[in-house]
Image (cartoon, rainbow, N blue to C red):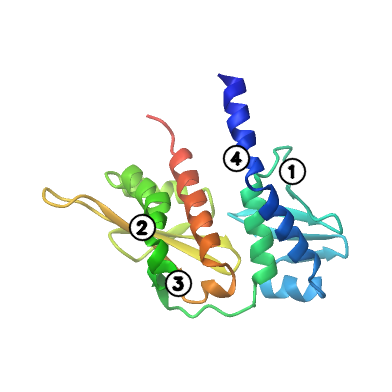
Amino acid sequence: MKNRHSSAHGSREQGFELPYKLAREQFAKINDIEEQCHKSGARYVGPNEIIIDYLNKPYHITLPDIEISLEDSEVEVPLREKILILHYFTLAEGTPATGILVTYKQLPGGISYFSAFSQRAITPFVNHFGKEPELLIDIAAKFGGCKADYGDVSVTIDAFNHVPIIFALWRGDEELAPNGNILFDANISDYLATEDVTVLCETLAWKLVKDTPST
């Protein structure tokens, strides 16, 4: 069973090898790393290293090989999360927050892909936290999240320095099942492509689910 799981994991990772290669190539084209650190909120350690905060943890990018590692950890960073980190850094425009919230449907191409986004990101967290919404606040705190003022229960988690993600829940009743949504600042497309938003929200939703202590 263990070997079968490892094989499946390896196959999933292989599926991200080409996007990871392309992400590294795009990163390598950046002319001014220090300026891009300023736009993304990353920390410029020196010409051979930068640090990006992702889900409340520091990730080191070493140059020029463009390798990514989690600080003080021997665990290999999954390729899809390496891709997210590189895409965020490369695309970041330094646009200030607008204070205006938007839904996934309002992102470029979001209407066409909302059904898949909802199934991959919204449904898992609603199914898991819908009956105990307050639990979401405690779990989100592990990722640097804090209570927000949307829906009946909501949290804001800074996935990256300039990318707050709001998970909002509405309680169900005898007639209606619990409901939820994921909200973003209107400037999110200046930091991540819509497909990256999907991957990020799916990743974060499942981290919240899996980090819930079993009863």
Q: Is residue 130 left or right of residue 140?
A: left
Nearer the viewer's eye, disc 2 or disc 3?
2
Nearer the viewer's eye, disc 1 or disc 4?
4
Q: Is residue 175 left or right of residue 81?
A: left
Amino acid type, residue under disc 3 in the picture: Leu
Q: Point out the tag, 1 or 2, that comes first from the N-terminus.
A: 1
Dot 1 lies on which element? loop
Q: CA distance from mark 3 to mark 1?
A: 36 Å
Amino acid type, residue under disc 4 in the picture: Arg
Q: Point out the tag, 4 or 2, that comes first from the N-terminus.
A: 4
Nearer the viewer's eye, disc 3 or disc 4?
4
Q: Is residue 32 left or right of residue 73?
A: right
> Label 3 crowding class (10 Å Cα cut-off): few <14, some 14-19, many 20+?
many
Q: Residue at x 58, y 75 (%)?
A: 190
Q: CA distance from mark 1 to mark 2?
A: 38 Å
Which residue lies most toward the left here?
A: 175
Q: Point out the tag, 3 or 1, that comes first from the N-terminus.
A: 1
Name the residue beneath numbered marker 1. Answer: 72
Amino acid type, residue under disc 2 in the picture: Ser
Q: Is residue 76 above or below residue 31?
A: above
Q: Point out the tag, 1 or 4, that comes first from the N-terminus.
A: 4
> Label 1 crowding class (10 Å Cα cut-off): few <14, some 14-19, many 20+?
few
Name the residue beneath numbered marker 2. Answer: 115
Q: CA distance from mark 1 to mark 4?
A: 25 Å
Which residue lies most toward the top here?
A: 1
| x and y, in percent, of residue 122 in the image | 37, 53
Amino acid type, residue under disc 1 in the picture: Asp
Dot 3 lies on which element? loop
Name the residue beneath numbered marker 4. Answer: 12
Q: CA distance from mark 2 to mark 3?
A: 14 Å
Dot 2 and dot 3 residues touching (CB under 8 Å):
no
